[in-house]
Amino acid sequence: MSEKNTIKDLRNAIDEIDDRILELLNQRASMVISIGRLKQGEAKDFYVPSREREIYERLTTGNHGPFPNEALKSVFREIISASLALEAPMKVAFFGPKATFTHIAAMHQFGLSAELIPSKSIPAVFEEVEKGRAQYGVVPVENSTEGMVSHTLDMFMESDLKIIAEIMLEIHHYLLSRTGRPEDIKKIYSHPQPIAQCREWIEDNFPNVPVVDVASTAVAAQIASEDYTAAAIASELASSLYDLKVVRERIEDQVNNFTRFLVIGKKGAEKSNDDKTSLMFSVKDEPGILYRMLEPFAKRGISLSKIESRPLKKKAWEYIFFLDLDGHVLDPAVSEAIRELRDCCQFVKVLGSYPRTA
């Protein structure tokens, strides 16, 4: 058999496989529609993060290649996204214009079939969900280099929305301009967070170029698209949306640069086999209080993955604490620890229990 005939035969075989995949996708879609009707009758949530996690874990564990696991997750993310759209229209608010990292995180979590709604501020994202104009919201909460996002933490003090999922996104910053030539750059624009994450690189490569803070990386990209002497520090996606060229790629100072995002909604998430719970609380000012607030978790063997303090805006020298711990609020040990914590606190608020990022 000649090489030409072999390629033709293989392509015909691929076509047959594609036809089978198409048939199976439509069978799956029919079952999803049936599940959607049952959920509607039982008033159950259409979006269940724990179920999505189970699907990804089962498929990646059973995948023996050569199709890579990350590509497999991307394919099924879009299958799940399209399926959710068949069950019910999915509206998701996110912080920032298109091409920001929160936009990318929302696409990563909900796929391209969801209707993603840009919001001008973090409070605006909360408002969209609280007023029912979006079922869910996506907001940044911390960066591995620059720490916590204070606006998000502050909003949880005022809002009754729950955390239902988290997204961990590896952040890569790109220097973009209209010409792509470094010598044309007279000003660099970006949001303060990316600027801080690229400060050393900027000082080494553009020491005499002014760096200007703007509201978002998307705003920076828009400025660069209109000014041939301007450059933006933004995402790779921004280069295509704003017709910019890449001057330098991956200019972040730290190699492992991750941002954690939270998905917020009106109802808590179902229990999975690997959950995280987030709390906020204010303690009474008395000797040994730090020991007493950690003791309920320590004596039950509950691991704490993060503790963060912020000053109360209305009271000088008093603080509110944000805590992430392993486990679900329905776990007996976790619920007992939280109940004991209340004895030494002015208030305790459970922000949500949700599946840990795989």
Image (cartoon, rainbow, N blue to C red):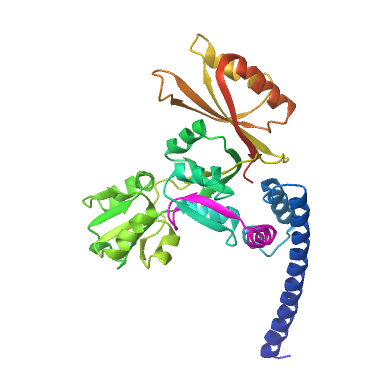
Most distant residue in the top direction: 287
Q: Residue at x 51, y 25 (%)?
A: 321
96 or 289: nearer the eye?
Answer: 96
User: Is residue 321 shown to the viewer in this render?
Assistant: yes
Q: From this view, report whether residue 12 is shown above or below residue 357.
A: below
Q: Could you say which quadrant of the image residue 313 lies in? A: top left
Q: Report x, y in % for residue 329.
A: 68, 31
Examine the structure image and report whether residue 338 is included in the region drawn in magenta. no
Locate residue 299, reporting x and y percent.
Answer: 67, 18
Instruction: Name the residue located 59 percent from the left edge and 53 percent from the top edge.
Output: 109
* Residue 93 belongs to magenta span: yes
Quarter where residue 146 is shown? top left
- 143 vs 115: above or below: above
Q: Residue at x 52, y 49 (%)?
A: 169
Q: Position of residue 260 (x, y in %)?
A: 52, 43
Q: Is residue 164 left or right of residue 173?
A: right
Q: Is residue 38 above or below residue 314?
A: below
Residue 355 falls in image quadrant = top right
What's the magenta region?
Answer: 75-100
